[in-house]
Image (spheres, rainbow, N blue to C red):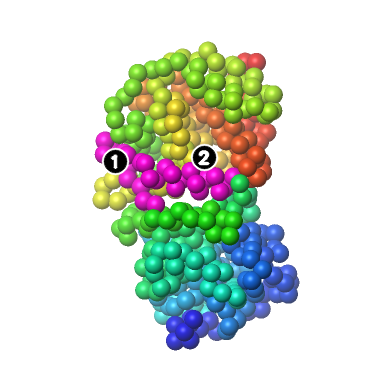
Amino acid sequence: MNESTRVSVPGQRAPSDPLAATGDPRQRQDGLGWVTRALFDDPGVTLTIGDDPAAAARWAVIPSLADARFLLPLASRRVTAASLLAYNALRPPKVRAGRAAVGSLARAGLLGLTRAPILSARTRGPGDLLASFLADRLGVPRLHAAIGIRPPDPHHKPTLQLFDDRGRPRGYAKIGWNDGTRAMVRAEAATLGELPSGGGFPPAPRLILHTRWRGREVAVIEPMPRTVRRIRRPDRPRVEAMLAVARRGGPATGPRPVADLVETWRRRAEGADPRIHAFIDALATGPELEFGDWHGDWVPWNMARHRGRLLVWDWENRSTGVPVGFDLAHQAFQTALSTRGRPAADCAAAVDEALRAYGPELGLDPPRQRFVADGYLVELWLRTYELSGGGAGWNPKLHPALLDVLATRLPR
């Protein structure tokens, strides 16, 4: 890195975490440890906490080692500021204000005032860092990665927001690092290549690269338009867009028996907890329904508005042949679970409430609303089961809680 572009970060405080001060941050058991293990597991990469002048790349750990949420690249003032300010309009107001304040400090060369710790990476060669590998594949001189940090979870995938030397967004890289997350990255790459357009189908950022790197599955997805904004009233379901996804932008299809769906569930449940088989059997005599596609993770934080249209991303869980209404059920369940911290039983009640309110717009009368709700809970448990088999472990929020919820809802 040219010294003229290096961000000076004076006044660094000593790390408060003894492990971070004396050992490799990859040994940590928190989100910082998980992300650094997933991205820097090559023995040729040396990671240290502290400003290493010989490092190939450096990041500010925001806001602190103990509560790391973001690795902010320190390639130049322009890149550092862009990492904080790009797409800030998508953030909640409190987060947006905080990022704007730190971004202004970075742009002025005053990031040291935050006293954020520095993560430094030494390498044996340029290909040891994923951002350098991707720059070569994408034909740009350099890329710099802003890295989000989430709590350790085998279902999570590290995501890198990539910037060039001018601070322009060049894409998002999703990293599959175990069998389950590698399959999810492959699925999204395949899906983005075949999404329809027109008929009210919401546009999505396109795939620009699908590759492998040192046992990782990597998909790079194009950056969003700079003028995207948060959706208004995020709890309100976008029913027309859900229907466009379900029908692939085409007309409605006639109702069909649930036999094929139930048989698919039975195959997927082979070897699973016997209780799920009983619940699937209880749904075998369900009403005829309209079937179609679903996004699979239809939640407000996977969408934005742009030029009067809905922009939707994160298509890794899309599948076909499910009852129309699964996306509505998913939004209700996941909003209650992820943003309100509600237990599974309360989340299932939120699904019932959403289907009562909006189900008629999807052509669902009360018996069909109940089948879609129960069927969605079965589908969600099966997804959790399949992820556990792919090396992702069990999600403790969903297992065995979903089986307990289903036991109260379905006759055995």
Which of the 4 image quarters holds residue 294? Answer: top left
Residue 362: x and y in percent read: 36, 26
Which of the 4 image quarters holds residue 346? Answer: top right
| 130 left or right, relative to 226 | right
Which stretch appears magenta? Answer: 180-207
Report the residue marked by disc 2: 334
Q: What residue is rendered at 39% in x and 36% in y?
A: 237
Q: What residue is rendered at 38% in x and 45% in y?
A: 193
Numbered circle sitting on residue 197? 1
Which is nearer the N-term, disc 1 or disc 2? 1
Image quadrant occupied by the C terminus: top right
User: Quick check: marks 1 and 2 in contact, CB under 8 Å?
Assistant: no
Under tag 1, what secondary structure? loop
Task: Please state which amino acid type lies under the numbered disc 2.
Answer: Gln
Residue 195: x and y in percent read: 36, 41
Q: Is residue 81 magenta?
A: no
Q: CA distance from mark 1 to mark 2?
A: 27 Å
Q: Is residue 185 magenta?
A: yes
Under tag 2, what secondary structure? helix
Q: Residues within 10 Å of mark 2 (few under 14, many from 20)?
A: many
Residue 147: x and y in percent read: 52, 63
Q: What residue is rendered at 59% in x and 53% in y?
A: 177
Do we see residue 381 in this rendering?
yes
Q: Nearer the viewer, residue 374 or 192?
A: 192
Residue 342: x and y in percent read: 58, 39
Q: What residue is rendered at 46% in x and 69% in y?
A: 144
Q: Residues within 10 Å of mark 1 (few under 14, many from 20)?
A: few
